[in-house]
Image (tube, rainbow, N blue to C red):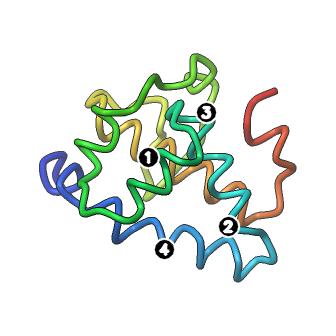
Amino acid sequence: MSTREISKLLFTTVYPLYVQKAERKNRTKEEVDTIICWLTGYSREQLSHHTAVKIDFQSFFDQAPGIHPNSSLIKGVVCGIRVEDIQEPITQKIRYLDKLIDELAKGKAIDKILRR
């Protein structure tokens, strides 16, 4: 999928899939929200608003208060590509989020996921 295609995906559509993935592995929506708020700087209220309106990933990340400085510590493979090697900023941010949700679904402790 090209950068343009992935950045135009609706966050509103993908968010419930993140929650479903987590819940299938006995994790919670609250944990998903914690991860997203940590990465983006959104408050829970702001995140709740963005899950209720149609917003694409590009706009979701453009409007984010600030990407967490420890996001550069996120490493690993998503869709066969190392997230730390992705050059396009928006694609890297989306893949960071994908990687964090994968870690949650695999049972990793929330403190480790948040790079504390």
* Residue wearing tag 4: 16
The Cα–Cα distance between marks 2 and 4, rounded to whole angstroms, is: 9 Å
The location of residue 81, given as percent across then percent down, is 42, 47
Q: Secondary structure at mark 4?
A: helix
Disc 3 or 2, which lies upstream in sequence? 2
Residue type at the position of mark 1: Arg
Q: Nearer the viewer, mark 4 or mark 3?
A: 4
Disc 4 or 3, which lies upstream in sequence? 4
* Residue wearing tag 3: 74
* Residue wearing tag 2: 29
**Mark 3 neighbour class, 10 Å CA radius: few under 14, some 14 to 19, many 20 or more:** some
Q: Does residue 112 appear left or right of residue 49 in this picture?
A: right
Disc 1 or 4, which lies upstream in sequence? 4
Q: Are marks 2 and 1 in contact (CB under 8 Å)?
A: no
Q: Is residue 11 depicted above or below 19 in this figure?
A: above
**Mark 2 neighbour class, 10 Å CA radius: few under 14, some 14 to 19, many 20 or more:** some
Residue type at the position of mark 2: Lys
Residue type at the position of mark 3: Ile
The location of residue 54, given as percent across then percent down, is 24, 63
Q: Residue furthest left?
A: 4
